[in-house]
Image (cartoon, rainbow, N blue to C red):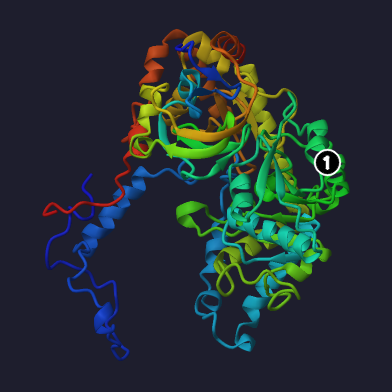
Amino acid sequence: MELIFERSRPGRGTDLLPPLDVPECPVPEEFARKNAPRLPEIGESDLSRHYQALARRAFGVCDGFYPLGSCTMKYNPKLGEDMAALPGFTGIHPLQPAHTIRGCQLAMAQTEYALARITGMDRVTLQPAAGAHGEFTGLLLIKAYHVHRGDTGRTVILVPDSAHGTNPASATMAGFTVRNIPSTAEGLVDLEALKAACGPDTAGLMLTNPNTVGLFERDILAITKIVHEAGGLVYYDGANLNAIMGVARPGDMGFDVCHLNLHKTFATPHGGGGPGSGPVGCKEFLAPFMPGSALCGNGGEHSIGQVRAFHANFLVVVKALTYLMRLGNSRVAEAAQGAVLNANYLKHKLEEAGYTAAFPGLCMHEFVLTLEGLKKETGVSALDVAKAMLDDGIHPPTMYFPLIVHEALMFEPTETEAPETLDRAAEVLADILRRAKEDPEALHAAPHSTVVGRPDETAAARHPVVRYTFPEG
Amino acid sequence: MNIPNELQYTRSHEWLLVEDGVAAVGLTDFAQDALGDIVFVNLPQPGDEVNAGEAFGDVESVKAVSDVISPVSGVVLEINEELVDNPALVNEDPYGAWLIKVEQITGKEELLDAGAYEAHCAEEG
């Protein structure tokens, strides 16, 4: 497929930009570029076809099953897009007088209130732009709390060995040292190891619940108690809230601060359809340190300051509020229950088909298979199975994560999939398992039907080519 | 799997060679094989302190990012700049591609000889 630069012809263009209707304001001479930018010149019809062709090569939730574990790729209702496109939400400017944007402020306040109720927290800020940004913000709150009390020796954040990589990264960014807590053979936090790791240098513990292998930390009350008794705070990573929202609340489990991913749990688009949004909630005693928000103005008395310009990714908040209001109180819990039911249904079907779960028994909203046995027996790896799924129009699950499981495949079907979709996915995977045993070589060559099959990931990572080189150099 | 007799090893799969008071540290053949193709190596600066049993850098493969643990305490004398441009050397020649050299050594982790390390690798399978 030609690149947009290769389709460029001098002199062609579009009328996408309206004519200038305000006085021209020239850029000062010293900042003005000497040569015209080398932007592609292309007619509107060719431009449209170019992006349509790219879109046909992409795969989204609207194309098929997308059980990417740990990412909560649920279907996002189109109603959210309709609401976010309302002129009252789109035709505003962050610097216009507050009394002219009361409706937008109300939407933000309602969202903050709903999220506070769902998480069991007292305050919520909508500022953070994504999950990791929320983690960073929450850790700054923990830091500000300890520093404000003069307890400056608390420099260590504890993180389970199954955690998302963003947890240690955010803790390091916030100036903490990270200490790993091992998991038990059952995949849960090792309480004895946690006790041994806690001490006067403990600033806090970061935890997801359900955790990263899809299991509910049933000792959660003991876990938060151990950390609190050591003088630390407990951070809830909201990555997996989809499993418990409306059913159990991090605030009731002893967590002091949390973030949520609106782009996962609350049905707003991920990635290219984003941007994301990672609101942070906290208990009342941390409120003085919070960044500003629609509810509490410019932040608390000892605020860590703004973490994002103006009102952050506001239209994402509108979509999340739409989702919550459409569901209503009772059906928020139904969504979580559906996610857990679907995950257990698919897990059971795959175990019946001969796959091995990394951890037996009931799971929450996601589960992890280990293909270590299959790889030893046939040479077919988790990667081969994932690639083979592409030929059947299914997006692969998350591979090789969490790191504590060898040859891991992590499935999160979400609540928005019908039983027939799960049945078909189970059939496809059963067939792949049969083929792995009969003809492993063929599976090493999969996929056969996609435009890109097995890119050279090593070369791409070692020698990334991320810009177009013009032929004239 | 290649486990040279003249080196010492850690349980976290680093090798150590001490000559004239300077310790060269690298990743073992087992480690590079388990990690897969290494695409990025993150090393400290010369003059930085390293502590036995603590991470001094990390390596990124197509599978994961992993800490590299220092077998000794001391001060970084030199880092292998070549690996920054060509991390594949760790895969191609793990015992030639040292990561850092450490001087002013004040302490060591519990180290294994080649035989004990081979047994340790067999256990980890």
Tell me the quadrant of the picture where the N terminus of chain A can be found. top left
Q: Residue at x 65, y 22 (%)?
A: B110
Does residue B100 lie above or below A471 as drawn? above
From the viewer's perspective, is residue B83 above or below residue A310?
A: above
- Please rate how many residues cluster around mark 1, counting C-alpha atoms within 10 Å: few if below 14, some from 14 to 19, many from 20: many
Q: What residue lies at 54% left-to-right and 84% top-to-bottom?
A: A95
Asked whether, in this view, residue A33 is left or right of residue B23, the answer is: left
Residue A166 vertical placement versus A197 (above, below): below
Where, by quadrant of the figure, is residue A23 drawn? bottom left
**Which residue is tagged 1?**
A223
Q: x, y (%) of residue A269?
A: 53, 55
The reply to whether residue A453 is visible in this rendering is yes
Of residues A195 and A1, the one drawn nearer to the viewer in this rendering: A195
The picture quadrant where one finds residue A51 is bottom left
Please provide percent x and percent y for residue A162. Answer: 65, 35
**Mark 1 is on which residue type?**
Ile
Regarding residue A395, the answer to whether it shows in the image is no
Place of residue A446 in the rendered image (x, y in percent of width and height, measured from the top left): 38, 23
The chain to which mark 1 is attached is A
Q: Name the one closer to the observer, A135 or A49.
A: A135
- Foreground of the two, A193 or A132: A193
